[in-house]
Image (tube, helix red, strand yellow):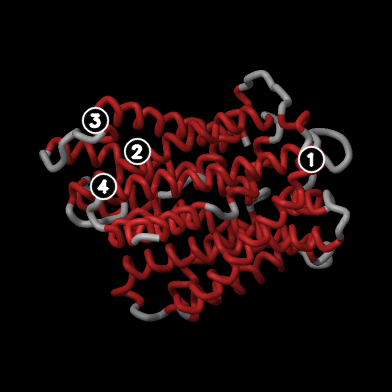
């Protein structure tokens, strides 16, 4: 393999690995009523929008000559209100995701221990266990995250291979008429497609090579899209909509995620398969928790470093306690927190980049040469962001 291919392959896996995580576990729970065909259509639509906004952020950094996060770009090019909005959106996004993963992790443990422990206790233990690695050091958190990620990928491949023959074409080809209720799945699907957090590190590694960066993000975001399609095919193609051990059963359960994992695990005659399914989902949630936890811990360290210095315990309390409270006291926190995260992500990933581009156009810092920087394209992307924001707010208000 030549050097050019090697340089692209590594970053592609970084983008894909950063994107794939616990959010995919919630997808079947929100999309089961719409069916596989509608869900696939929505996924492709959202993927195009998120990829476009990611490439727009790349163009902003290329014109800026210094690689920054959207938070950094908003601090530089927007007024104080815009910068504050960027900061708040980032915090809300990370806190919501951590709350979702803490809730999801405790749900898996609840089923794994045969409901012998209450979910509040398990939620606290989950946060202490994985938040503790970050509190000790970033190096320790990085190593445990690598091990869990490898285990997650191996588990996913085994599950796909074991259940692919059990898929019912009749379940997948079920044609549902369009319904506005389908839109309620958009926040969760949208959240699972966020590749934007990896943009700064990829650009610092690759440099100012536009063509190479574009390939990395197109392929790197396309891999999760393909995996999500496969995951949806497995879940929606095996579990019936109604009846015993169905999505109807899952929706009526107080522990929806845990019930979903338990039902999925019974689809194979092997007793070891149920154990494997629980571990795969637990690894997916744990790696996501560690990744987001590290990001929020670093953000607080950057913002409050002068105040707290190297007091890692203080920064850890700021990082994990708000999310823990949400996970403990908000009903169905796993889905709710993912939906709420979509609101912050829509602002950070779509609306703010569009506004920053407008400011850079006015200052003649960037020229609308690339497709994603043309005014008509950015206006359409901005409308896409408003559409997502409206759907998320409506979903949150209607419960």
Disc on res. 351:
2
Residue 378 vs residue 11: left or right? left
Q: Position of residue 34 (x, y in %)?
A: 67, 29
Q: CA distance from mark 1 to mark 3?
A: 45 Å
Which label's residue is closer to the chain start, 4 or 1? 4
Mark 4 and mark 1 in contact? Answer it, CB < 8 Å. no
Q: Is residue 335 above or below residue 272?
A: above
Instruction: Name the secondary structure under disc 1.
Output: loop
Q: Is residue 92 above or below residue 56?
A: below
Residue indicated by mark 1: 239
Mark 1 and mark 3 in contact? Answer it, CB < 8 Å. no
Which label's residue is closer to the chain start, 1 or 2? 1
Q: CA distance from mark 4 to mark 1?
A: 43 Å
Which label's residue is closer to the chain start, 2 or 4? 4
Q: CA distance from mark 2 to mark 3?
A: 15 Å
Q: Position of residue 354 (x, y in %)?
A: 29, 37
Disc on res. 210:
4
Q: Residue furthest left?
A: 364
For image coordinates 60% across by 45% down, the residue present is 336
Residue 64 vs residue 31: left or right? left
Residue indicated by mark 3: 374
Which label's residue is closer to the chain start, 1 or 3? 1
Residue 335 vs residue 210: left or right? right
For image coordinates 56% across by 55% down, the residue present is 21
Q: Classify residue 371 by image quadrant.
A: top left
Instruction: Name the secondary structure under disc 3.
Output: loop
Mark 2 and mark 3 in contact? Answer it, CB < 8 Å. no
Q: Is residue 87 above or below residue 294?
A: above
Q: Classify residue 155 by image quadrant.
A: bottom right
């Amino acid at each position: 393999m030549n050097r050019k291919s090697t340089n692209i392959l590594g970053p592609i896996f970084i983008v894909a690995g950063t994107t794939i995580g616990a959010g995919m576990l919630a997808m079947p729970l929100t999309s089961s009523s719409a069916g596989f065909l509608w869900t696939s259509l929505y996924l492709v639509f959202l993927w195009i929008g998120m990829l476009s906004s990611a490439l727009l952020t790349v163009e902003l950094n290329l014109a800026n000559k210094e690689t920054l996060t959207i938070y950094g770009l908003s601090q530089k090019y927007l007024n104080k209100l815009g910068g504050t909005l960027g900061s708040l959106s980032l915090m809300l996004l990370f806190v919501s995701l951590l709350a979702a993963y803490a809730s999801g992790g405790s749900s898996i443990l609840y089923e794994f221990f045969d409901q012998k422990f209450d979910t509040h206790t398990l939620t606290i233990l989950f946060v202490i266990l994985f938040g503790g690695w970050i509190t000790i050091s970033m190096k320790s958190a990085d190593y445990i995250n690598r091990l869990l990620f490898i285990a997650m990928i191996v588990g996913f491949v085994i599950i796909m291979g074991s259940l692919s023959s059990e898929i019912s074409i009749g379940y997948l080809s079920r044609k549902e008429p369009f319904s506005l209720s389908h839109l309620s799945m958009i926040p969760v699907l949208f959240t699972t497609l966020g590749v934007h957090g990896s943009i700064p590190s990829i650009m610092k590694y690759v440099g100012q090579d536009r063509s190479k960066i574009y390939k990395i993000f197109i392929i790197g975001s396309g891999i999760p899209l393909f995996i999500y399609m496969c995951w949806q095919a497995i879940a929606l193609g095996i579990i019936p909509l109604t009846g015993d051990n169905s999505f109807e059963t899952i929706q009526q359960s107080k522990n929806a995620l845990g019930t979903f994992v338990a039902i999925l695990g019974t689809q194979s005659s092997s007793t070891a398969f149920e154990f494997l399914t629980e571990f795969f989902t637990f690894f997916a949630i744990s790696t996501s928790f560690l990744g987001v936890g590290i990001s929020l811990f670093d953000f607080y360290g950057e913002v409050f470093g002068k105040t707290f210095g190297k007091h890692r315990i203080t920064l850890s309390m700021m990082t994990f306690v708000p999310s823990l409270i949400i996970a403990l006291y908000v009903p169905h926190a796993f889905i709710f927190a993912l939906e709420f995260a979509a609101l912050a992500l829509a602002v950070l990933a779509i609306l703010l980049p569009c506004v920053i581009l407008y400011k850079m156009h006015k200052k003649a810092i960037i020229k609308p040469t690339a497709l994603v920087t043309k005014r008509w394209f950015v206006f359409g992307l901005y409308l896409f962001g408003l559409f997502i924001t409206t759907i998320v707010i409506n979903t949150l208000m209607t419960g």
